[in-house]
Structures are given as C-alpha cells and as structure tokens.
Image (tube, rainbow, N blue to C red):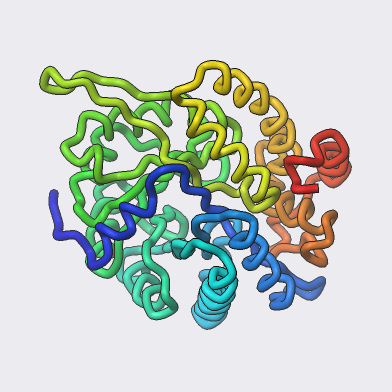
Amino acid sequence: MSTSAAPGSIDVAARLRGGVLIPAHPLALTSTREVDWVAQDRLTRYYVGAGANGLAVGVHTTQFELHHDAGLLREVWQRAADAALDEAEHHDRRPLLIAGIVGDPDHAVREAEIALECGYEAALLCPWGMTNRSPASLLDRAAVVGLVMPTIGFYLQRAIGGLHLDRKFWSGLFDLESVVGVKAAPFDRYATNDVAQALIVHDRWQDVSLLTGNDDAIVHDLITPVIASVNGKRRTLWFEGGLLGQWAIGVAEARRLLDMAVKARHDVGLAIEVLAEAAAVIEVNAAVFDVDNNFAGCVAGVNEALRQQGRVATSVCLTDKERLSPGQATLIEQARMRFPHIFDE
C-alpha cells in the first residue's frame, strides 16, 4: 500500500526530530463539567513557555468523549492553537500542533479537515470510536486521513482501549508516505519492540519519527538504540522524543531530562545519571496514572496533579467513568512531596 505524502509532510517530519517534547493536552473543567477556558488557556501557555516543541490536543488525555461534540471539539482545538501560537511569539520556537483524530474513516476525515482549518499540522490516529478496528480498517483510515494532513500512528495500551498490532501492520502503516511518526505507547516491551523492529528494516526508516508514549519507560526508551543490519548496512534508530500524558505535568523538568537523554546517547557517564532519574519518573507516573487500579484513574490523575498545583480548579472529567480511584489523590500528593522537581515545583 502506498499513497502520496500529504501537504506539509516533509516539514512536519523534520520537526519531529532531535529531542521533541509534546505534552498530551488535558481538558480543564469546572465542577459542572463545562470547559474552564481560563485554566485551559493557562495550561497551553505553560506548556509552550516551559519548553514544549508541540501540543497534542483531542487525544486520550484531552478525553476522547470530547469528540462526541464536534462544535466543542473545534473550539478546544482552535483556542489551544491560538494560545500556543500567541505564547510562541515570546519564545524561540514554533510549536507543532497535533490533533487527536478518532472514529471511522469518513468521520476521521471530517475531523482532520476541521483540525486543518484550526491550524493543526498533523493527525494522531487514535483507535477510539471505530466500529471496525481490524488492522485493514486502521490502515484504510490512515490512508484517507493522510490525504488531508500528515499522520502519526499510535500504539495505544490495551488497558485503556488499545489492541494488539503486529509487525505486518506497522510495516503496512509505514508504507504510507503521509505517515511521519509513530507513538509507541503499549506499555509493553515486546509490543514496543515490534514497532521499532518494523520501522528499522523499512525503506522509510529515516522518514518516520519514533516517539515514546510509554509513560512507564520514558527514560529507557529515550536512551536505548535499536540496531540492525539491513542489506549489509548498519542502521541505528533512536526515539526522537515523546508524546506523553506524563508530560502534561512538569514540562520544564521534562525538557531538562529529555535534553540530557539525547546528550547521554554518546556519554556513558551521563547515561547512568539519566537512568538514575528513571525510577523517580516511574514512581510519579504510578501515582498519576493509577497503576494500582489498572489505569482506571489515569486521565483524572493528570487533572488531579494539576489541581493540586493550582493550575486547574477540579479533577472532574466529562463522564463519571473517568474519575480518581480511592486513595489516588493522596498518592499524587505524596509523589509531589517526594519528587517536587518532576512537577516543576
């Protein structure tokens, strides 16, 4: 399978290189489940100002249920884009705007067209809201969305709605010239390796950026090379950065750690120092993402961490299904006390 590259693919691909930090943007709500636009705007500006290279809006951390209301989704996309670009004028960077796209092919294309109108430059292909989630259907959807804008594949963990995808699927996805990146977030070493191994042997291995979404293995992903010999030539593949819900908190510290990780690839001493940070990041993530309850409170946990910091007013989500687990708020508070630097405190 092959398609022509979407307009802007080359530019987007270039901007997904060399230590890219992309927070998955939360949705700030009031106690009555209305969008708190003041807090939402403040979050966007915080991310850009603290060192993010881009933003992903309309993704799992933004709450997939947002996609039930096309008008509100458009407004969330537009306001985030406007605030990000306005804040960027004060900094030496232009944030890459990525829209989370859901649903069956026709619906996904409509969302991509709206996102493009709002100034977004790439689509993260989320498996949520599809009536047929077979590998063939996912590839067909990627192809048609790719006619609208550059796309980023997404390996979502099973605990929150993902499905198993083998190397054949990933190879087929990388065949699409509109695909400029892939977010590996299965929270599974074998599944992550499937993505990396499919990419490193592919003809487009230098055209597709590998991004970590594994909040439980951020540091390990960033400093681990994938090496293969293809047609007698050595190839080395690195994660170019990440697109993470974990990076919705503590962006300045994430920027510092990411920059260190990139430098550590050629400095063994620094690599050990970076690895020493991994356990702390995992401890924080375990509390925020509610690992004890199989990630049931992962979206609300991000909001709760931001609430405790005073960045948003509530941890409320769009549906009752997304809520904090018993004791989770206390675990987050304890994590903040133990590792304040990870929260930018």
Q: Quadrant of residue 208?
A: top left
What residue is at 68 percent from the left and 71 percent from the top? 40
How many numbered discs, if any? Answer: 0
Name the side, left or right, on which 262 lies relative to 35. left
Name the side, left or right, on which 75 lies relative to 169. right
Name the side, left or right, on which 85 lies relative to 113. right
Say if residue 69 shows up in the picture: no
Q: x%, y% of residue 143?
A: 23, 58
Q: x%, y% of residue 69?
A: 54, 77
Residue nearest the observer in this picture, 276 or 140: 276
Residue nearest the observer in this picture, 86 or 330: 86
Q: x%, y% of residue 160?
A: 56, 45
Name the side, left or right, on which 183 lies relative to 177. right
What residue is at 73 percent from the left and 56 percent from the top? 303
Q: x%, y% of residue 54?
A: 50, 59
Q: Quadrant of residue 228?
A: top left
Q: Is residue 155 above or below residue 229?
A: below
What residue is at 26 percent from the left and 51 percent from the top? 139
Q: Is residue 82 above or below residue 267?
A: below
Say if residue 38 shows up in the picture: yes
What residue is at 78 percent from the left and 60 percent from the top? 315
